[in-house]
Image (tube, grey):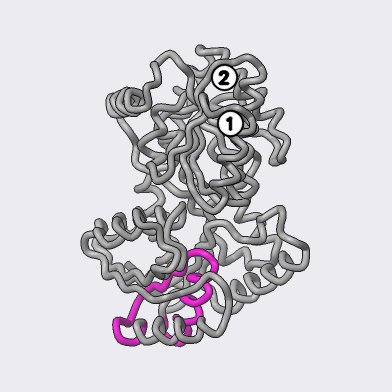
Amino acid sequence: MKILKIIETGGGGSGRHILDLTRGLIARGHEVHIVHSPLRAEPVFEQRLMALPGAEIVSIDIRKDVGLHDIEAFRQLRRYVREQGPFDVIHGHSSKGGALGRIAALTTGAAKIYTPHGLYTLNPVLSPLKKGVYGVIETLLARTVSDAIIAVSDREFDHAVSLGFPAGRMFLVGNGVDPRLPTELAETRRRVRERLGISDHLPVVGFVGRFCIAKAAERFVELARKVREAGQEARFILLGSGRGASDIARRISSYGLDDCLTVLPDESGEEFMPAFDVYTLTSRYEAMPYVLLEALAAGRPIVATDVGGSRTVIDHGKNGFVVPQQDDVSEMAEKVLLLLRDPQLRKSMSEASYRKARDFTLDAMVDATLDVYRAALAERVGFVT
């Protein structure tokens, strides 16, 4: 197949998804073109994107906000589709890439695919007016210019159907990661802890995510404060950066946590995950965050808010705990303290996470996505592989 992917965002889970999926598609003999916008692209994403072997990469300035600038972006995208096509599949990722990609695919004969990577209407702090407007736009596009929509978690799937997305065009394809060997995990844990000056006996609680409303990194700082107030010794590692960095730093200082909470920007969550003893997800909303899958692959117990993907990844009480999605982190602190105070429970949950990682492989994600492409093409033109 000849496949075109469009993405406006340049990092996070959607960026990781594009990179991993493209490698898998190329490895299976498909031709992949990627249109991406450099305006919000993270440097690491751009480096890895440009290093993708066998992929055709083109940059078009696509902005997150809606405006007249979208006309020029669409004109350039449409020209690329005409000049480099015909494509069998045009697959838009996230809201802006999904909208422009599906509209550009009209009249081309290509299957029009959309992966939201977390519909914005899942945001619990979004005003009813904005939620209504975004919901109407997303549903209109889903019903009029979509052959298939891929949700990455059960919660996103159900939410999309509740908005009015046609259930017959909805597919559930979870994200996936490569498995990790126990010897690799042990060596990575030793190396990272040695770098940070942390003994193997001191428990570490970790967090990975941007400083933004969705990820709620400030809750992790509050969690650290509650654990310390309970008299439990631990180190807290926060991997992240963003516009809220100054607020996070202020909170850490005001709570007197400078000696036990370390903020590390521009570090790899996948690299640091084995060094954690407990992984926490404090998000307000998600689709299927890769950090949860990385925690599984590293065999980490997880304590997560009840957001998209959490109940798919976590068997409550077996490999972690799911707690209410709220600013009060008291229940999360209770579960973290339970794990920190019980090494045997941490060990059993670690083993359970490592076993569960087999359910979320990268190969399964790529194969399932190809099945969606084939189904959409078969529906349109009787395509058979």
Q: Amino acid at mark 1?
A: Val
Name the residue: 48% across, 37% down: 263
Verify CB contact (< 8 Å) between mark 1 and mark 2: yes
Quadrant of image for the C terminus:
bottom left
Q: Amino acid at mark 2?
A: Leu
In the image, the segment drawn in magenta is 81-109
When the figure is inspected, residue 371 is found, relative to residue 331, above or below; the finding is: below
Residue 189: x %, y % from top left: 35, 25
Q: Nearer the viewer, residue 137 or 268?
A: 268
Residue 81: x %, y % from top left: 36, 82
User: Per the image, is 154 magenta?
Assistant: no
When the figure is inspected, residue 159 is found, relative to residue 205, above or below; the finding is: below
The residue labelled by disc 2 is: 339
Name the residue: 46% across, 39% down: 239
| Quarter occupied by residue 251 | top right
Residue 228 shows up from this direction: yes
Mark found first going from the N terminus, 1 or 2: 1
Residue 278 shows up from this direction: no
The residue labelled by disc 1 is: 303
Name the residue: 48% across, 49% down: 174
Quadrant of image for the N terminus:
bottom left
| Outermost residue to the right | 128
User: Per the image, is 100 magenta?
Assistant: yes
- Judged left or right of residue 132, residue 58 is left
| Quarter occupied by residue 222 | top right
Q: Which mark is residue 200?
A: none
Please rate how many residues cluster around mark 1, counting C-alpha atoms within 10 Å: few if below 14, some from 14 to 19, many from 20: many
Callout 1: SS: strand
- Judged left or right of residue 219, residue 274 is left
